[in-house]
Image (cartoon, rainbow, N blue to C red):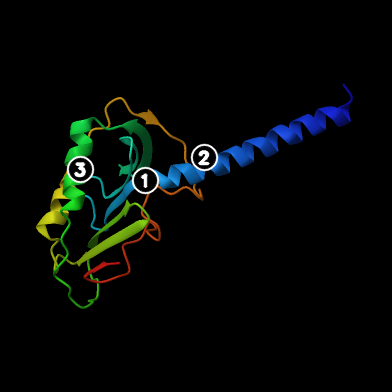
Amino acid sequence: MTSQKVCMVILCAAMWQICSASQSNDQHLNNVLARLSYTSTYAAISGQQHSPRICFEIYRNGGYRVSRMTNGTTDTLRGTLTQDELGSVMGLVKGLDFDNRQGGSVIRQGSESFVAETTSGDQTKRYEWLDPDHQRPFPESTLGVINWLQDFKAQGAKRLVVPEFSADPICPRGDGMMPVARYGASCF
């Protein structure tokens, strides 16, 4: 085989992989049930077991991806929830209730933020909450989800390598590594 033919074979194989990945990415996005994130900007307390940054993506088939900051490094894992775990977390997510809308405020010492993005059919709902300086505590329904995220044990999960600028986010869209820019709560 000539080098020109070898190059054409390699080019065709690369193009096929790109097209396949694009189609699989579209199917992947259509199977997402929810994306959740929790971020705390407060200084970590020595010996604290809670993660200051967690992003969790849940699929209709019970699959999940989780990105969790621990001791200054981020671990990204992929696994499958049991039916009980899936039912538990989705029950908590469906119970989100943000009826306490308040104005903005200045963050002086730190903040905690929570974002949930849920999909049902072709409808997407987004919930955001920012607690600046412990002045606007999370609603009870939000605390349930945050506690679930913090306590979740990724048993049997496999490490996942996600490029830093991946077009396939685990976190809710528009949720970077900084706290949510909105104040109070919103749902749209």
From the top left corner, tell me how far across and down residue 49 is, in percent.
Answer: 19, 41
Residue at the location (69% across, 36% down)? 14
Q: Is residue 150 above or below residue 176?
A: above
Between 48 and 127, the residue placed more toward the observer is 127
Between 132 and 26, the residue placed more toward the observer is 26
Instruction: First in sequence, mark 3 or 2: give its number.
Output: 2
Q: Residues within 10 Å of mark 3 (few under 14, many from 20)?
A: some
Q: Is residue 55 above or below residue 21?
A: below
Disc 2 marks a residue whose amino acid type is Ser
Q: Which residue is mark 1?
A: 32
Residue at the location (37% across, 45% down)? 32
Q: Which residue is mark 2?
A: 24
Please indicate, yes or no, whether residue 47 appears anywhere in the rendered image. no
Q: Nearer the viewer, mark 3 or mark 2?
A: 2
Between 182 and 85, the residue placed more toward the observer is 85
Dividing the image into 4 quarters, which one contains the C terminus? bottom left
Secondary element type, mark 2: helix
Disc 3 marks a residue whose amino acid type is Val
Instruction: First in sequence, mark 2 or 1: give its number.
Output: 2
From the top left corner, tell me how far across and down residue 186 is, in percent.
Answer: 25, 68
Q: Which residue is mark 3?
A: 89
Instruction: First in sequence, mark 1 or 3: give its number.
Output: 1
Decide if residue 168 is on the left or right side of residue 7. left
